[in-house]
Every structure is written in structure tokens, then in C-alpha cells.
Image (cartoon, grey):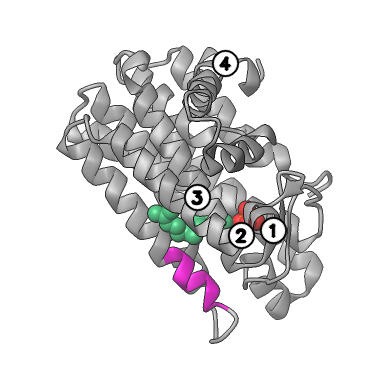
């Protein structure tokens, strides 16, 4: 089964379509969002949220608004990231700052964050708190990223950076899914850790693909210091790729192990499939 065939994927896409469709045609934001979402996107974070609700025995339909909020804040972060690191191509299309300019891009990010707040606010304290802290971590992580070229940037700094800028949203998505199902704090924390490990593995793969120049659907003008780069400075290119791939396998293994705390079911199978889909399945052949 492919991720695009999951019924949850269809539900997220249709909720997103409805959201944009309901906006006034004269809205500038509608134009920008239509451009942004016409290029697709994997919808991994909202999928993790909905599947986590199901995994914990909850009703996935109750998590759709939260899933949408997660996708919107993720989109806002990509728009802001493209502004910050000079991203000119995103998902094979001109990025929002490139196409609409910096002012419109910043305002679109503001709009998306605000819309996300309206969607998440009806949920309980745990969910809203988790959502807010993910946003704070992402911003913190991005500041570490943009400073990575200015100072000595070691493995430890890299992991702190990607944990905050990327893994925090994966982790919060999974925990929010658990809270919506009414799960215990202990299980929510296990799902948080699952999301964290997948998010770390995902960002390492993304950085590896950029390092070996295998990403043709996005392009940035400014580079960050990444794990393969840190390893290549110390051990040379070939060894760097080997060590980076081994880190990916390590975090994927940890993520999957955490899912063993949950009963076998369709949602768990789908989460396992997603885990590989955005990590190991993307590794270059022969690595
Ligand atoms: C992509 O990194 C960027 C992120 C994972 C996070 C960006 C976060 C912010 C700009 C903070 C925003 C905060 C809120 C609350 C909206 P990358 O440049 O390595 O990946 P890329 O290759 O996809 O651009
Ligand atoms: Mg970027």
C-alpha cells in the first residue's frame, strides 16, 4: 500500500481543499495558498497525527482539524524558511517568497499561523500546549540553523538544531494524536518519542540528499552546516555518507521500536510504512 492511497491522506487533502475553496476569491492569501498547495506535499505530519489517534483507539475524524492546523503551521515554517535560507524552488515550483515577494510571504506565514490557532484552539489544554511548544521549538531550531555557518558547528549542535527545527513538529503531531484519543500521558510520551526519532531521521536524509545533490525539487541559495558536511570535513566524502546512512538506520530503528509499545493494528502498519517512506526508502541506491 502507498501512503497516497491511505484514506487519511485523502481526508487531509480534501479538508485542505475545502479550506482554500471557502476563502473569498478576492483574497491575496487564497492566491498564494492555491499556488503553494498545487505542488502537493507529502502531508506526513498530519498523517502521523491522525494515525496516532487511531493507534490509541480514538476516532480519526475528531483529529482532522488538528491535523490541518499542523499542516498549516508546517507550511508557514517552510515559507519563512525559504525567506531565511534563500529557498527559490520548493516542491518543483517557485517558492512563495520567490513568486510573491518577501512582504507577502511573511504575511502569508502570519495568516497560516493564525488560521492554525483557530483550528487547534477548540481542543483541550494538552493539545494546544503541545502545538504552541512545537512552534517555539521550530523557531529556536531555525535560529541555530542560520547561525550554523558562523561558528564552529559540531555534531552535538547539529542534533540540537534538527531536533528543534524539524523533529519537534513530528513529535508534537504524534503526541497530539494520542491526546485527542484520550490516551494516557505515558503513551503520549512514547508517541512523542516516536515522532522525534522519525523527524530526526527524516532531516538527516534530507540533508544527505542535499549533500550529494540528489534533490531536484528544491533549491536554496544559502547553505547550512549539516551532518554529512561535518562528517566529510573529518573523514572524507565516502566515509561521511556511510556514517550518515548509519545514523538514519539508528533513528529509524528507535522509532519503530517505540511503536512496539502499541498493539498491532492497521494504524501501526501505516505508521511503520510512513517511517520507511520518508527515510530509508529515500536513501540513494548503494548506500
Ligand atoms: C526546513 O529546513 C525548515 C524547517 C524544518 C523549520 C523552519 C522553521 C521556522 C522557519 C520557524 C517557523 C516557526 C513557526 C511557528 C511557523 P531546511 O532548510 O533544512 O529544509 P528544506 O530543504 O526543505 O528547505
Ligand atoms: Mg530551506
- Establish whether ligand 2 lies closer than 8 Å to the Cβ of label 2: yes
Counting residues from the start of the chain, the first of labels 3 and 2 encountered is: 2
Q: CA distance from mark 1 to mark 2?
A: 8 Å
Pointers 1 and 2 in contact (CB under 8 A)? yes
- Which numbered dot is residue 6? 4
Q: Which mark is residue 98?
A: 1
The answer to whether the residues at label 2 and label 4 have Cβ atoms under 8 Å apart is: no
**Magenta segment:** 141-148
In three-dimensional space, the C-alpha distance between marks 3 and 4, rounded to whole angstroms, equals: 29 Å
- The relative height of residue 44 versus residue 141 in the rendered view (above or below) is above
Position of residue 233 relative to residue 165, above or below, is below
Whether residue 234 is visible: yes
**Nearest the camera: 95 or 229?**
95
Give the CA distance from mark 1 to mark 4. Answer: 33 Å
Is residue 143 highlighted in magenta?
A: yes
Occupied quadrant, residue 3? top right
- Choose top left, top right, bottom left or bottom right for residue 26: top right
* Residue linked to disc 3: 108
Please tell me whether residue 266 belongs to the stretch shown in magenta: no
Q: Is residue 230 left or right of residue 117?
A: right
| Position in image of residue 248 (x %, y %) | 60, 50
Rendered position, 196 above or below 151? above
The residue identified by callout 2 is 82
Amino acid at each position: 500500500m502507498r501512503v497516497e492511497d491511505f484514506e487519511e491522506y485523502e481526508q487531509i487533502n480534501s479538508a485542505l481543499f475545502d479550506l482554500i475553496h471557502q476563502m473569498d476569491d478576492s483574497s491575496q492569501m487564497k492566491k498564494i495558498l492555491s499556488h503553494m498547495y498545487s505542488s502537493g506535499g507529502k502531508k506526513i505530519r498530519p498523517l502521523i497525527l491522525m494515525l496516532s489517534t487511531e493507534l490509541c483507539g480514538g476516532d480519526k475524524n475528531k483529529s482532522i482539524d488538528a491535523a490541518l492546523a499542523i499542516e498549516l503551521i508546517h507550511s508557514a515554517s517552510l515559507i519563512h524558511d525559504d525567506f531565511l535560507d534563500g529557498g527559490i524552488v520548493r516542491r518543483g515550483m517557485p517558492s512563495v517568497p520567490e513568486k510573491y515577494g518577501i512582504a507577502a510571504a511573511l504575511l502569508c506565514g502570519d495568516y497560516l499561523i493564525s488560521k492554525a490557532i483557530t483550528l487547534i484552539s477548540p481542543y483541550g489544554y494538552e493539545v494546544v500546549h503541545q502545538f504552541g511548544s512545537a512552534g517555539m521549538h521550530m523557531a529556536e531550531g531555525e535560529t541555530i540553523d542560520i547561525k550554523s555557518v558562523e561558528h564552529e558547528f559540531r555534531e552535538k549542535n547539529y542534533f540540537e538544531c534538527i531536533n528543534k527545527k524539524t523533529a519537534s513538529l513530528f513529535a508534537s503531531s504524534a503526541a497530539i494524536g494520542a491526546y485527542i484519543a484520550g490516551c494516557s500521558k505515558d503513551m503520549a510520551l512514547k508517541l512523542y518519542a516516536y515522532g522525534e526519532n522519525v523527524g530526526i531521521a527524516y532531516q538527516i536524509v534530507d540533508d544527505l540528499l542535499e549533500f550529494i545533490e540528489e534533490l531536484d525539487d528544491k533549491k536554496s541559495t544559502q547553505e547550512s552546516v549539516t551532518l554529512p558536511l561535518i562528517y566529510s570535513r573529518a573523514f572524507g566524502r565516502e566515509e561521511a555518507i556511510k556514517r550518515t546512512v548509519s545514523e538514519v538506520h539508528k533513528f529509524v530503528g528507535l522509532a519503530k521500536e517505540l511503536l512496539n509499545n502499541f498493539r498491532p493494528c492497521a494504524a501501526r502498519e501505516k505508521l511503520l510504512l510512513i517511517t520507511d517512506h520518508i527515510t530509508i526508502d529515500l536513501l540513494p541506491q548503494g548506500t
